[in-house]
Amino acid sequence: MKPNVLAKKIGFYIMIIVVWQGLDSADIWPDNIFPSPVDVVEDLAYGAADGSLFFGIGTSLLRLVVGLSIAIVGGLILGIFMARVETVNQTIGSLVLGLQSIPSIAWVPLAILWFGLTDSGIIFVTAIGAIFAVTINTYTGVKNINPSYIEAARNMGAKGGQLIITVLIPAAFPFIISGFKQGWAFAWRGVIGAELLFSFLGLGFLLNVGRQLNDVSQVIAIMIVIMGIGILVDGVVFKKIENKVMTRWGLR
């Protein structure tokens, strides 16, 4: 990141904190409704000191990794089949488009009925929320591959799994990485939403505890952590991968 861009971002967040503190000092709202930045930092420090914050982060990230991994593998397989087999696209493809419109949180009741109040239910919500974004982007990427590339690979003896691994996935990767990025966002929302409703561990659980205790400072503190992880993963991890892929393919 360029120094001037970083400076602008830091300045922007400092301005938010200053305005936030100013509003709190003006006593427009009581502290139990609108806490100060100091109160929120104290809540974060307390959570870090007793380990609950780090344990919550680790639990949520573990569920995210498992669910997103399932979504990536399933989405790649389904997307490639949809792109290469017209019958699959005409049947399952329309279903995928319909299922993508269902919010992750809407899968929670079904997850509870199928898996109970377990980690498996949360992972199911996470995976089902992300898989369709990966599927559709993989399908689009494979469909946009120049047919001459596939024909050339076949003439050199590539077929089946070899064709998929050496030609289809690499050629479609700019689209696939976009699917991963969208899938991660849906998966992260799914994890937090599911934990909020029926988990006893994780960041979503800590968010719900703050609500039950009427502790607005804790609620805002956990929301900041959730947002921070989102910015870090999206802006650092996926941004770097996306830039490398796009540069390699001459798209930037």
Image (spheres, rainbow, N blue to C red):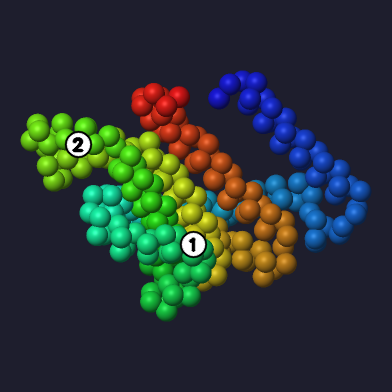
Q: Residue at x 62, y 54 (%)?
A: 222
Residue with the mark numbered 2 = 150
What's the residue type where badge 1 is placed?
Ser
The vertical placement of 237 against 104, above or below, is above
Q: Residue at x 23, y 49 (%)?
A: 84
Front disc: 2 or 1: 2
Q: Secondary structure at mark 2?
A: helix
Q: How many discs appear?
A: 2
The circle on residue 172 is: none
Residue 73 visible to an observer of this rendering: no
- Residue 124: x and y in percent read 39, 65
The vertical placement of 2 against 233, above or below, is above
Mark 2 vs 1: CB contact within 8 A: no
Q: Residue at x 56, y 66 (%)?
A: 196
Residue with the mark numbered 1 = 101
The vertical placement of 131 against 160, above or below, is below
Going by the picture, which residue comes out furthest to the top? 3
- Residue 112: x and y in percent read 44, 75
Q: CA distance from mark 2 to mark 1?
A: 32 Å
Of residue 174 and residue 67, the one placed in the foreground of this image is 174
- Residue 211: x and y in percent read 67, 66
